[in-house]
Image: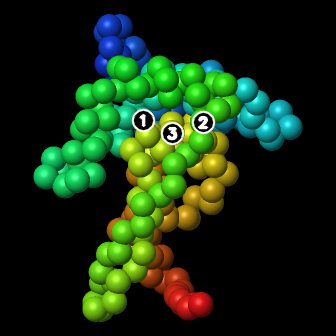
Amino acid sequence: MKRVMTVERRRAGRGKQGREIPPRWGWTEAAVWTERMLATLERGIKGGKWYSLHDKVWKMENLQRAVAKVTTGKSPKSADGRRCRRYAEQSAKRLPQLQRSIQSGEYQPKPVQRVWIPKPGSKELRPLGVPVVEDRVVQMALRNVLEPIYEHSFAHHSYGFRPGRGAKDALRRVQQLLWAGKTWVVLRQHTTG
């Protein structure tokens, strides 16, 4: 018997909407991933290819959730935080325009701003590309659609850049394996160029 959980999310003007989904997929975006889509993901899709995902990227609920995710945790004191807050405040006007440009295929990302940040433990600086807020919203909307598809195919023992997993989870797993008598050698190599 499969374990199932109900995920409830507040939607503007709609009250609560719940989904009956396996706990493994509780992090997925309800505005994009329906119970039926997640069930298809679990059992595997015929031919291994998903079709008709483009409309889910420009779906207004997905764009609104993307704005919320992009603006969450930004300091109101930083320039980037102020830009994110301003975009969120103007989203009722800006998102319909963005939706139309994505729908029509006319959307073009803007050039990223290059910022130089200090390298940890060094006096050197490294370049960092910072996209404009609107491009981050589109990237997040794409991520909401694509991440569960790729997440499903990752190995269970992979921990990097995955929802609900991180370096501490990897270290806990290594500790479990060491206690079980397993020995591993981890090599880390950096190349410069």
Q: How is the image coloured?
A: rainbow
The residue depicted at 60 percent of the width and 30 percent of the height is: 102
Q: Earlier in the sequence, mark 2 or mark 3?
A: 2
Alpha-carbon span between mark 3 and mark 1: 7 Å
- Residue type beneath disc 1: Ala
Q: Is residue 179 visible?
A: no
Q: Which mark is residue 188?
A: none
- Residue wearing tag 1: 66
- Residue wearing tag 3: 138
> Is residue 152 positioned above or below 60 on the image?
below
> Is residue 75 positioned above or below 70 on the image?
below
- Residue wearing tag 2: 107
Q: Estimate how packed mark 2 is, as few (under 14), some (14 to 19) or many (20 or more) residues with alpha carbons within 10 Å.
A: some
Alpha-carbon span between mark 1 and mark 2: 16 Å
Q: Is residue 80 left or right of residue 36?
A: left
The residue depicted at 27 percent of the width and 52 percent of the height is: 80
Front-most of 76 and 147? 76
Please state which of the two labelled residues, at mark 1 or mark 2, is closer to the viewer: 2
Label 1 element class: helix
Alpha-carbon span between mark 2 and mark 3: 10 Å
Q: Quadrant of the N terminus?
A: top right
Say whether marks 3 and 1 touch (CB < 8 Å): yes
Q: Earlier in the sequence, mark 3 or mark 1?
A: 1
Front-most of 76 and 97? 97
- Residue type beneath disc 2: Tyr
Q: Estimate how packed mark 1 is, as few (under 14), some (14 to 19) or many (20 or more) residues with alpha carbons within 10 Å.
A: many
Front-most of 79 and 137? 79
Q: Is residue 107 left or right of residue 72?
A: right
The picture places residue 60, in percent across and down from the top left corner, at 48, 21
Please state which of the two labelled residues, at mark 2 or mark 3, is closer to the viewer: 2
The residue depicted at 58 percent of the width and 58 percent of the height is: 156
